[in-house]
Image: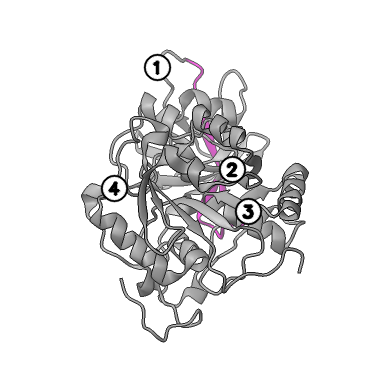
Amino acid sequence: MHLSATATAQTFTLSDFDFALPPELIAQHPAAQRSGSRLLDGTDNQPVDRIFHELPVLLQPGDLMVFNDTRVMNARLYGEKATGGKLELLIERVLGGNQVAAHLRVSKKPEVGATVSLTAASGCNDHPCATLLGRWPDAQGSLFRFVLSNDAGDDPFTLMARHGHVPLPPYITHSDSAEDAQRYQTVFAKNPGAVAAPTAALHFDEALLARIDALGVQRAYVTLHVGAGTFQPVKTENLSEHQMHSECFSVPQATQQAIADCRARGGRVIAVGTTCVRALESWALNPSQSETRIFITPGFAFSVVDALLTNFHLPKSSLMMLVSAFAGHAKVMALYAHAIRENYRFFSYGDAMLLTRQPAYQTPLGQ
């Protein structure tokens, strides 16, 4: 970890967001209890080690917590070509008309128009299959467009639910299990469309949510369908050359009103996860948009979010840059060093951290 004493928002490079992480700190399974994970309190000058169920002591009546209610799809499907060659589809987006946009992993790409057989779940005989239509141009050619079908005429969401697998992140080394089907999903997941969980919200169980409600903290929801691109490292040393993946999102009118009410009563808007930050700050920049490629790096002027609950992120990732922009690069790197020394668990099934926005970068909502 390093940062020149004279570094500014304009001089940050990719190397400034690198750090050495012992592999044994990458969580392979969730904590035994959702709210039993650890919570690093980074809201003061000195970090405080807590348990996640202590979160209410850090909240105030009148605060507003914003959650992402996206639901993770069983987006990973396996199959084979007519030649017998194995393949894997990772459904990134459902397009309508039984069409999907998907990542394709295969030794040799099938011809356009070819139909491949998908592996049916045990006990099912509805013959799921996928027909390749070509590239999906909206993703700069990195995704393929397929039609999913089966004998019963089910839609892609039903086919994934029946035959798909939980799309665990690449750093989790085991195959998906019944535990993953439950725990790689928030307790309030509602709108299907994500291929990765909004992981900061995985720590909340119904009992903790009830305690937060009783405290007088309000709740609101956005939907941002997290894409597989969230795991892609930034590869360009010059951050301005990085192109973000696109994600669908919405900020309902009820949430917009809840934010206005929170501001009026002097409460804090607390985003549960970086996906909520991306949705809220994208909405503030352009209320009419429904897709975002926002790339938040140090120097970004936040206009909505006051505090952030977040897990620990990959080195050189866009999410490391987002949290550094939010709380300050030097502080975030110091907190990560503390977390490594204290054996916190990292990434999707890992522990969490609470941050407050550094005062240097803020613009009033609406300006």
Whether residue 262 is situated above or below residue 161 in the rendered picture: below
Res. 287 mark: none
Residue found farthest to the bottom: 6
Residue assigned mark 4 = 26
Report the Cα–Cα distance between label 4 and label 3: 31 Å
Report the Cα–Cα distance between label 4 and label 2: 24 Å
- Which mark is first along the chain, 1 or 4? 4
Please name whichever residue, 251 or 72, is drawn nearer the observer in this view of the structure.
Answer: 251
Report the Cα–Cα distance between label 3 and label 2: 17 Å
- Which mark is first along the chain, 2 or 3? 2
Whether pointer 4 and pointer 1 mark residues with C-beta atoms closer than 8 Å, the reply is no
- Which mark is first along the chain, 1 or 2? 2
Task: Tell me where the magenta segment starts and ends, as one range.
Answer: 125-144
- Which mark is first along the chain, 2 or 4? 4
Whether residue 6 is situated above or below residue 235 in the rendered picture: below
- Which mark is first along the chain, 3 or 4? 4
Q: Residues within 10 Å of mark 4 (few under 14, many from 20)?
A: many
Magenta stretch containing residue 187, yes or no? no
Q: Residues within 10 Å of mark 3 (few under 14, many from 20)?
A: many
- Of helix, strand and loop, which one carries label 4? loop
Report the Cα–Cα distance between label 3 and label 1: 48 Å
Quadrant that contains the N terminus: bottom left
Q: Position of residue 90 (x, y in %)?
A: 46, 41
Residue assigned mark 2 = 68
Is the image coloured rainbow, by chain, by secondary structure, or in one colour? one colour
